Image (spheres, rainbow, N blue to C red):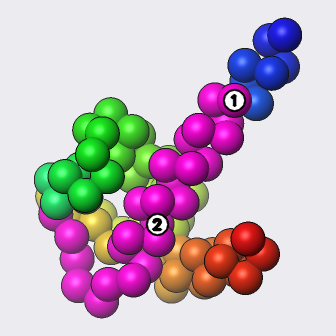
Amino acid sequence: MQDERIRDVAEEEAKWDHAVLQLLAGETSPWSIDEVIREIGDRVAAEDAISRLYGAGLLHRLESFVFATRAGISACRLFFLQG
């Protein structure tokens, strides 16, 4: 039972991470964090995804702006090819 809940949470986080990374990997200019939040539509999910992606080295942060790293862009492309 607990394994299912953990799996559900992990899948939900992966969904948000992919949405944010796909958004940022498709653009060449930085997005403000507020723009990402508005586009995603869920402040907590967007901020958590940004933190996870930054921690994984897939996003750069510059004050209140974020943009995909080269690794982030590659990861997004690989995920698209697999999905």
Is residue 11 within the magenta segment? yes
Taking depth in this image into account, of 72 and 5 the one nearest to the observer is 5
The residue carrying mark 2 is: 21
Is residue 47 something one can see in this rendering? no
Farthest residue in the top direction? Answer: 1
Tell me the residue at 54%/60% (across/down).
18
Q: Is residue 74 left or right of residue 39?
A: right
Tell me the residue at 46%/71% (across/down).
22
Which comes before the other along the chain, label 2 or label 1? 1
The residue carrying mark 1 is: 8
Q: Position of residue 14 (x, y in %)?
A: 61, 48
Q: Position of residue 48 (x, y in %)?
A: 41, 40
Q: Is residue 28 above or below residue 67?
A: below
Query: Number of callouts in the render?
Result: 2
Q: Quadrant of the N terminus?
A: top right
Q: Residues in magenta?
A: 8-32
Is residue 14 within the magenta segment? yes
